[in-house]
Image: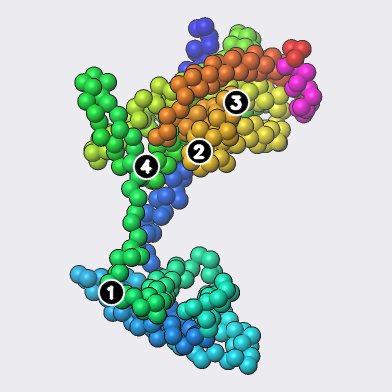
Amino acid sequence: MHKILRIAKREYKAAVRTKGFIIGLVLAPVLMGGSGIAMVLFEKHVDTTDKKIVVIDHSGLVAPVLEQAAKNRNENEIHDKITGKKIKPAFIVEIEDPQENDLNAQRLALSKRVRSKEIHAFLEINENVLHPDTSHAARIAYYAENASMDELRGWFGWPINNYLRRQRLESAGVNPDAVRNLFDWIDIEGMGLVSTDEETGEIIEARRSSEGEALLIPLVFGMMMFMMIMMGAMPLLSAVMEEKNQRIAEVMLGSVKPSEFMAGKVIGGVGVSLTASLVYIVIGSLSTSRMGLTELVPYHLIPWFLSYMLLAIILFGSLNAALGSACNDQKDAQQLSFPAMIPAMIPMFVLIPVIREPLGTLATAMSLIPFWTPVVMLLRLGTPVEIPAWQPWVGLAGMILFTMFGVWAGGRIFRIGILMQGRPPRLADLVRWAIRG
């Protein structure tokens, strides 16, 4: 045991004393949450270039309404109330009479104007839009280079539909002002569940629930688990390969058994991941405390996180160390590194489906498959939904059993592979070594 700890200590120091570890510790969460940070940073950076839109109105009713609505918006909404700075683009509506004899030519000419950036888009309103007898008669088409993602298309919907509602009410003999609130939209506020204080028995009111909060907590724990696996287990493949290639492993094996050598490497990886995770947990707790958001931190998940992480690093670390022992050079290691990463990467493709349906068949099944249990089970536990109490324990038991098997199989491969020279690793060889030893 003393020899294993000495190897683990050497491996741990070699990892945490490098600049790469410090840089990775800082950059990993930045890169993982880069899209969210970018959205916050660039949220207020809006293109304020004026947007010109041509309207072809076959009904002759709606175009003047759009022109007036755009004028009102440009006067009241596009400048900051305090500084007077322009913060939104102006919408300029140009009305063009429809060329009924050759509409396709008119659409083509306007499309060319859009491509040349002379106008931003053009809108075509059907003749019977006020009282349509078919869905096609009510058609309003918005033509632009990226129409599906264009926010301007959504803005046009408000003045058009408000005007059409008023006209239809008037034609039905109803005063629109008398039913002004008829079409007001009422948001449904998302709330959690009411609970009781276990100590006092008092009823605790439900907290307001937001989609951002529901996504943030499981995503943070799931992504952090993935980072720890990548940081503590995956580097063992190249590290073992380098020591084997440089004959360091042969020298080490003169005083320790192959199993002790591999155990020391894996325990060193566990130490690296524990250090990084504790740094993130402490910094996260202090930051949320200073911001007054302590209630958002799910402290009950930390023991689950550490338990699953410990087993995940041992499992993936043993398998990566075994694969590294079978490699003779960097080329062999590169060929095996991606296949070794696939089991850890698969949960990354189902993050949102699992968070949205934590009790679904997909989420439940994946969380009980040992390779994916650490990430997927934490995603499920991080949601506001109550997960059946037996499932985390079954997942943990499955991880323990599968980790024992992984260490056993990895040790048998490591024992043979670390002394094998000159022959590139093949899947059949690895399987045979694991079975026969």
Of pointers 3 and 1, the one earlier in the residue sequence:
1
- The residue wearing badge 3 is 369
Which one is earlier in the sequence, the residue at label 4 or at label 3? 4
What's under tag 1, amino acid-wise?
Answer: Asp
Dot in front, 3 or 1: 1
Instruction: Using the numbered discs, state the Cα–Cα distance from disc 1 to disc 4 in whole angstroms.
Output: 40 Å
What residue sits right under mark 4 in the picture? 213
Three-letter residue code for mark 2: Glu
Magenta span: chief secondary structure = helix
Q: Is tag 1's residue or tag 2's residue first in the polypeptide sequence?
A: 1
At label 2, counting other C-alpha atoms closer than 10 Å, the crowd grade (few under 14, some 14-19, many 20 or more) is some
What's drawn in magenta, residue-wise? 423-434
Q: Position of residue 371 (x, y in %)?
A: 59, 27
Q: Closer to the camera: disc 1 or disc 2? A: 1
Q: Where is mark 2, residue-wise?
A: 357
Choose mark 2 or mark 4, whichever is in front. 2
* Residue beneath disc 1: 177
Q: Residue at x 29, y 69 (%)?
A: 180
Instruction: Give the alpha-carbon distance from disc 3 to disc 1, as whole Å.
Output: 61 Å
